Image (spheres, grey):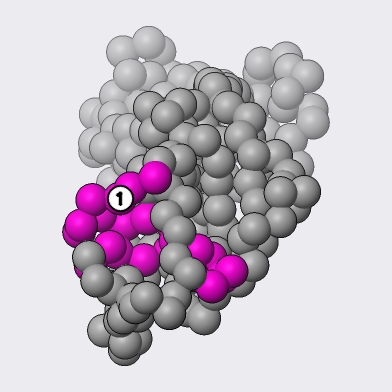
Amino acid sequence: MSIGSRIKQRREELGLTQPQLAEMVGVSKGSIGNYESNISAPNEKILFKLFTALRCDANFLYQDNFEESEIERTLDNREKEHIKKYRTLDKYGKNAVDSILNIEYDRCTIPAAEEEETPTLRIKRSVYKVSAGRGFPLDDPDSWDYINVPDTPAAQQADFALTISGDSMEPIYHDGDVVLVQSQPDVPVGAVGIFVLDGAGYIKKNGGDRLISLNEQYDDIILSEDHNATIVGRVIGRV
């Protein structure tokens, strides 16, 4: 398209008649007709008035005179339509589009910062699950494997880990949680520990004469001389 064709195209897009455009830029209707027919070309002074009246810039009117770049040659129809719409926006609309475009461009092109690897510790864990319910065996010395856990102060003090089965210690400890245990022959009253009762391992709160579940739906286990009870250690954290 010629410069004259672009003037006509933009005038019609804005719904302007030739007389209206002529009045806006201070020329006659015939001059506008000559511009659009490429009989004559606007001088520099009139050209800047046309930019204002047609709400466009030199890139729009002279775009067909520029040598097509590699990017322009590879634009698909959708991209060309976006550019066409962009050129009709006022400066506020263009600023809004530019802001969103810059944000999305950065999101898609700037690689996300690599997360630093969290240091870990290798710690042994019983293959048996300690019960927050009915109890599981915990006295087989050969039934241990090893897991890597985050290197935390609690993990550094832990002697081993156990997986919980059951919900009697909710809402603090949940089914499937892995807890860190420090081996010790005694657990203070009110603290949570690992206890072996008649060969079955439990995670419970030490109540002195009983083992207490945090979940009120479960009854306490009252200790008596008939029970073979052993304290394995204190729960000091959770993985």
Point 20% across, 57% down: residue: 189
Q: Position of residue 56 (x, y in %)?
A: 40, 31
Can see residue 38? Answer: no
Camera-nearest residue between 211 and 87: 211
Camera-nearest residue between 30 and 182: 182
Q: What residue does disc 1 label?
A: 187
Q: Position of residue 107 (x, y in %)?
A: 52, 32
The magenta stretch spans which residues?
185-207
The amino acid type found where label 1 is placed reads: Val
Question: On screen, 176 above or below 113?
Answer: below
Point 47% across, 79% down: residue: 133
Question: On screen, 235 above or below 139?
Answer: above
Point 71% across, 49% down: residue: 141
Q: Residue furthest top?
A: 44
Q: Position of residue 53 (x, y in %)?
A: 30, 35
Can see residue 138? Answer: yes
Dot 1 alpha-carbon crowd within 10 angstroms: few under 14, some 14 to 19, many 20 or more: many
Question: On screen, 169 above or below 33?
Answer: below
Q: Residue furthest front?
A: 225
- The question of residue 172 being in magenta is answered with no
Q: Quadrant of the N terminus?
A: top right
- The secondary element bearing badge 1 is classed as loop
